[in-house]
Amino acid sequence: MSESFSTWRPHPWHGLDAGENSPNVVNAYIEITPFDVVKYEIDKETGYLRVDRPHRATSQPPTLYGFIPQTYCGEEVALMSEHADQGDLDPLDICVISERPINHSEVILNAKVVGGLHMIDGGEADDKIIAVLENDNLWSEINDIAELPGIFVERLTHYFETYKMIPGHESTAKITGVYDHEMAKKVILASQRDYQNKFGK
């Protein structure tokens, strides 16, 4: 063979990058699909998906859900919030809207950033970037969250405020605001600074 290929799979968080057009269009690594009744999460050591927990409630994620590689929610992300004591110390989450069902996780896709949800979970900033599949036949012309049908934001807000809820207990997660694509890009850049501060180049 004239070309050499690595025999090792790159770590989805550290071995991939955010994309050459970041923060406008980013690489998104998908952990959960709208068909999943179990929450999967990247294992930070190995890069494989680990079963985090079955969903307690009946609701399922309304969109594809994953993270942007080489991002981290630390001090820079927390500074953008009036409500957070710190970032959640995880990669920056992203929700991606697609017309056609994508029922496989552990895929990478190009996501066009349109906005975000500012979520506080236990005093920690746990923002959710909202994006559309870049080459989607229906949604690719959307540029800002204001152009999306309101039901998408309602469903995402309800999901994130209730997916950890235990009957008889108050939820620790609260969506404190919805922001546009310009603010979403600032959050992404802050998370990339946090990543560099934490892990270096």
Image (cartoon, helix red, strand yellow):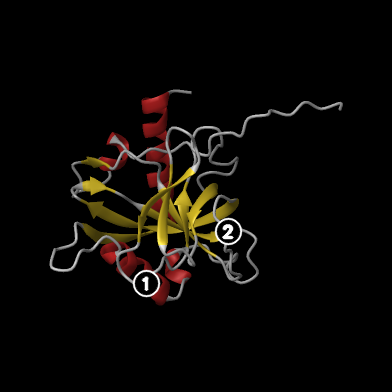
Q: Which residue is mark 2?
A: 104
Tell which residue pokes out farthest to the top in this image.
200
Tell which residue pokes out farthest to the right in this image.
2
Lower position in the chain sequence, tag 1 or tag 2 = 2
The amino acid on which the numbered mark 2 sits, given as a three-letter code, is His
Quadrant of residue 105 in the image? bottom right
- Counting the numbered discs, the total is 2
Mark 1 residue crowding within 10 angstroms, few (<14) / some (14–19) / many (20+): some
Q: Secondary structure at mark 2?
A: loop
Mark 2 residue crowding within 10 angstroms, few (<14) / some (14–19) / many (20+): some
Vertical relation: 162 (above or below) 119: below
Vertical relation: 121 (above or below) 144: above
Looking at the figure, which quarter contains the N terminus? top right
Quadrant of residue 89 in the image? top left
In front here: 46 or 24? 46
The amino acid on which the numbered mark 1 sits, given as a three-letter code, is Arg
In front here: 100 or 169? 169
Give x and y (percent) for residue 201: 48, 23
* Label ID, residue 133: none
Measuring 63% from the left and 30% from the top, which residue is drawn there? 8
Give x and y (percent) for residue 35: 49, 67
Measuring 23% from the left and 58% from the top, which residue is drawn there? 173
Give x and y (percent) for residue 4: 77, 26
Q: CA distance from mark 1 to mark 2?
A: 21 Å
Taking the image as shown, residue 137 lies to the left or right of residue 43, namely right
Q: Secondary structure at mark 1?
A: helix
Q: Which residue is mark 1?
A: 155
